[in-house]
Image (spheres, grey):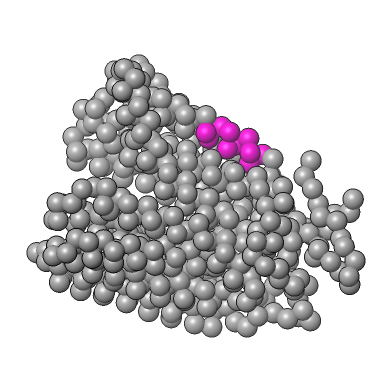
Amino acid sequence: MTLAFEGPRLASSRDFGWLSIVRLGLVQAALGAIVVLTTSTLNRVMVVELALPAMVPGALVTLHHVMQAFRPRMGHGSDVGSRRTPWIIGGMLALAIGGVGAAGATALMTVNMTLGLVLGAVAFSLIGGGVSAAGTSLLVLMSKRVHAERRAAAATIVWMMMIFGFAITATFAGKMLDPFSPSRLIAVAAGISALAFVVALVSMFRLEGGSVTAAESTDAPEPRPAFREALKQVWAEPDARRFTLFVLLSMLSYSAQDLVLEPFAGALFNFSPGESTKLSGVQHGGVFAGMLLVAVATSLLKGTPGASLKKWVVGGCVASAVAMAGLVYAGVAGGPWPLKENVFFLGLANGVFSIAAISSMMALASQGRRGREGVRMGLWGAAQAFAFGAGGFLGTVLVDSAKAAGLPLGLSYAVVFGLETIGFLLAARLALSVRFDAEKRAAPAEVAGHPVPQASAA
């Protein structure tokens, strides 16, 4: 069996510099601004101001996650066109329209619940579709145009800018919505959505440039098959398949404590609502620190074993398992426990493995058959969306089930944390089996009409 292999590619004039990376970060921040408006602000308005059951916004947000199952199909569409900008701009437009529509639907619920729910379903479907199109294509563009040595730092910049977009939007919307009225809600949503779309449009202007022809690049794609065939080809690649399972398992473990940790702190450690909310801030601070640690370390240690993304992914998963084991002990033993320090360490470990995994994703996207980058990235994005959509819900179900089975309160929470511990360890084992420390790229499936065997993993 032959194996076409390329080592780490040399930097070229087509590689994005830091300014271009920041421009991509602005697009991600714009995307995050609309998403947080619809999944956080509108969620609170429906439950508090409109006194609706929590399952109403919960179902709509779940719909937004379900729509991200179309990420592989949208990634395939961008592969066929060989340019990502139209998909990013089109996705942001759908996202902006969905953001305004979601606010309008929330306002409509005050006078006609049925029509409001129908409009809400349409709007949140647009939001999910927009995130899928824009987010997937943006990641593919980064994977193809950011040099390997900059990927961890680039991923950190882009994701921190997205979180910055979350924070700015939540603060601005919170101030502008007082005093609350349905018309004010629509106006604020329209302003944020329009501004976010303009920021994305300006940021993407002439950023990607024209597509590269076969004569200009050795990265020219082979003829594109139908989507089902392309997806089948990608799933047949051992590394792509294992990394999909890694993303699914690690992100399930990552998100299962989202709706469990604060009630755990209140029930067993007598944290007040304000203190438990601050605990979430402690965790996010740890995530920031972990992201920065990977970005700085891989930049300073480039060319050495310490820059290996696989080691950071595996180490971050193992450290996350250790942190979750600490919460298991706290639930079982009760009594004094440095909960804040434990939660900060959990955030730190989560930040390490997640940003290293995103950076690895960029390398893996171009590993395998050429011209399938969008399908691969879409497949991993869909796995992540499913994990996030299911993780928090499964965590609460497990706690309630353990209580119903008669387990003590602390042990009920420990069951969830224990399963997350196991999940992180299994994810680390999966990551060890994926080859993503070098940019390996298989040759086209056919060259001059002669088939070239694809590499298979051991």
- Looking at this rendering, what residue extends furthest in the left direction? 179
Residue drawn 67% across the image and 67% down it:
226
Q: Quadrant of the C terminus?
A: top right
Q: Quadrant of residue 38?
A: bottom left
Task: Please provide percent x and percent y for residue 409.
Answer: 29, 22
Look at the magenta stretch and give its main secondary structure: helix
* Nearer to me, 180 or 379: 379
Q: Quadrant of residue 137?
A: bottom right
Q: Is residue 356 left or right of residue 331?
A: right
In reply to whether residue 456 is colored magenta, the answer given is: no
As drawn, 185 above or below 51: below
Q: Is residue 347 left or right of residue 259?
A: right
Q: Is residue 67 left or right of residue 8?
A: left
Residue drawn 73% across the image and 81% down it:
213
As drawn, 352 above or below 345: below
- Looking at this rendering, what residue extends furthest in the front direction? 114
Task: Please provide percent x and percent y for residue 56.
Answer: 26, 52
Task: Please provide percent x and percent y for residue 235.
Answer: 67, 52
One can see residue 294 in this view = no
Q: Which residues are magenta?
A: 423-432
Residue drawn 59% across the image and 71% down it:
77
Task: Please provide percent x and percent y for residue 262.
Answer: 28, 36
